[in-house]
């Protein structure tokens, strides 16, 4: 008998019929003799609908009320799944994050889980009850509802699995595993049998939305093996786990893209100490995450400083930089939202040379201009014109030998 944690994403619970399908899967796992704890997301599209309502009602909704609102989607699905299981003759009980409780910090809309109380869950499991927990939400020390950031139910699931020391943490979604790139963009993408935490972290940070970044950080920290699989078939999925020697033989494991960043340039900045601090300190204080930064070689004592920020923060960033520009003697500020970042990821890069070169040559053959480059031990990212995103992902996928003739699902 094992303790199994299963998470079902929005598309897996998107309709009443799909919730019935999930209930049958959960019931089967229970009938096989396992203790089962299920984490569910809101029905597909529901969280977007709630976010749009908040945006409609006022320009800057309070973060506390935003969390009260957007967390409601998951309350619906835990109740429906629980009702469905009960109607099939099982003992099932739903819990909101605040009822477990899942304790978080008070950073609304992107809260971090601090601890999870396992007492009630363990008691219920002992009495043969299937537990259904609302993903994406928690409660802070003052009793306020918090949410964990978009895609946060993945993190709820991994955290619950870690807290309960579960034997398995299964993330059920609408594709049957982690692919070499987004299978919705490149039908030739291949399913990856197993991927290291480090590579999965890079894939998630660089745009692959199949797992929330924090869920992978959590899994790595607490050594939880994640099994990503489809809720619509029984094929084995992808194991996200500790790196092993076999993984190192693969040079590039995946390609990711991100169209959610914008580029900001501060032009004609005097090349002298303290300038970068004057630009990036106020951005940091405003909670804006700066990703790539490039500073050109100075000409006549002046230089251009270019960096990327999330598109959602671009307006805010421009306001801050435009205010700072005259105080540092900059000549102007420019920005471009029509960019995307394409990245290649692989632990094999640590021990093999020439991989970045293949990437640059492949893009150049297609006439795609590289605007910015950044590298780490296991990834290379290039910023390009967003209209070439799909082309770039496809040619890189082929160039690194990742194409698989069989299609998804
Ligand atoms: P859920 O609602 O189950 O949480 P998500 O939409 O968050 O599902 O994540 C699944 C989606 O992630 C897939 O439909 C797929 O389009 C996208 N995706 C992006 N990159 C990848 C990748 N490398 N492998 C698998 N799926 C990916
Ligand atoms: N419902 C939330 C969202 O859409 C959390 C999740 O699905 O993981 O972001
Ligand atoms: Mg998701």
Image (tube, rainbow, N blue to C red):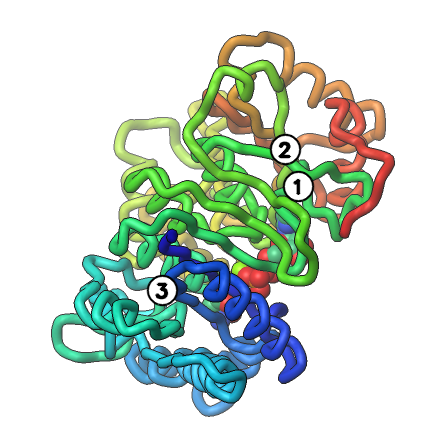
Residue 148 falls in image quadrant: bottom left
Which residue, given by chain and number where applicable, does mark 2 sit on? 254
Percent x, y for residue 287? 32, 57
Q: CA distance from mark 1 to mark 3?
A: 25 Å
From this viewpoint, is residue 389 visible? Answer: yes
* Secondary-structure class at tag 3: loop
From this viewpoint, is residue 59 visible? Answer: no
Percent x, y for residue 23? 55, 74
Q: Residue at x 19, y 59 (%)?
A: 115
Q: Is mark 2 within 8 Å of ligand 1?
A: yes
Classify mark 3: residues with Cα within 10 Å, few (<14), some (14-19) or many (20+).
Answer: many
Q: CA distance from mark 1 to mark 2?
A: 7 Å
Which residue, given by chain and number where applicable, does mark 1 sit on? 179
Which residue, given by chain and number where applicable, does mark 3 sit on? 148
| Label at residue 327 | none
Up/down of 57 relative to 35, above or below: below
Classify mark 1: residues with Cα within 10 Å, few (<14), some (14-19) or many (20+).
Answer: many
Q: Is mark 3 within 8 Å of ligand 2?
A: yes
Q: Residue at x 32, y 27 (%)?
A: 272
- Asked if labels 2 and 3 touch by Cβ distance under 8 angstroms, the answer is no
Q: Residue at x 50, y 23 (%)?
A: 378
**115 and 131: which is toward the camera:** 131
Say which label, 3 or 2, has the lower sequence index: 3
Residue 110 falls in image quadrant: bottom left
- Asked if labels 2 and 1 touch by Cβ distance under 8 angstroms, the answer is yes
Percent x, y for residue 381? 58, 32
């Amino acid at each position: 008998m094992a303790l199994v944690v299963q998470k079902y994403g929005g598309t897996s619970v998107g309709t009443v019929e799909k919730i019935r399908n999930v209930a049958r899967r959960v019931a089967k796992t229970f009938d096989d003799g396992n203790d089962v704890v299920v984490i569910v997301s809101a029905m597909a599209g529901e969280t977007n609908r709630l976010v749009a309502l908040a945006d409609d009602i006022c320009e800057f909704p309070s973060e506390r009320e935003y969390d009260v609102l957007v967390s409601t989607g998951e309350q619906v699905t835990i109740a429906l799944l629980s009702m469905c299981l009960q109607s099939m003759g099982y003992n099932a009980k739903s819990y909101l994050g605040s009822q477990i409780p899942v304790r978080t910090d008070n950073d609304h809309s992107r809260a971090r889980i601090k601890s999870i109380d396992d007492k009630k869950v363990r008691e219920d499991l002992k009495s043969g009850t299937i537990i259904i927990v609302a993903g994406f939400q928690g409660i802070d020390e003052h009793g306020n509802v918090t949410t964990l950031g978009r895609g946060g139910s993945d993190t709820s699931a991994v955290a619950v699995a870690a807290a309960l020391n579960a034997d398995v943490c299964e993330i059920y979604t609408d594709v049957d595993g982690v692919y070499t790139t987004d299978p919705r963009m490149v039908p030739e993408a291949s399913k990856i049998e197993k991927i290291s935490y480090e590579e999965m972290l890079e894939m998630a940070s660089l745009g692959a939305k199949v797992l929330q970044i924090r869920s992978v950080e959590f899994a790595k920290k607490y050594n939880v093996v994640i099994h990503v699989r489809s809720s619509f078939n029984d094929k084995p999925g992808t194991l996200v786990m500790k790196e092993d020697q076999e993984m190192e033989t693969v040079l590039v494991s995946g390609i990711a893209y991100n169209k959610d960043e914008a580029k900001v340039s501060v032009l004609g900045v005097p090349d002298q100490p303290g300038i970068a601090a004057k630009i990036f300190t106020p951005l940091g204080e405003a909670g804006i995450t700066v990703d790539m930064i490039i500073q050109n070689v100075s000409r006549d004592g002046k230089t251009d400083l270019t960096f990327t920020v999330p598109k959602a923060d671009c307006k805010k960033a421009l306001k801050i930089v435009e205010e700072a520009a005259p105080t540092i003697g900059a000549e102007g500020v420019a920005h471009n939202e029509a960019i995307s970042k394409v990245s290649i990821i692989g632990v094999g890069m640590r021990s093999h040379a020439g991989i970045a070169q293949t990437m640059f040559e492949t893009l150049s053959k297609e006439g795609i201009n590289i605007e910015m480059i950044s590298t780490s031990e296991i990834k290379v990212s290039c910023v390009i014109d967003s209209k070439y995103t799909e082309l770039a992902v496809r040619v890189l996928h082929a160039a690194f030998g990742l194409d698989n003739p069989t299609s998804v699902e």
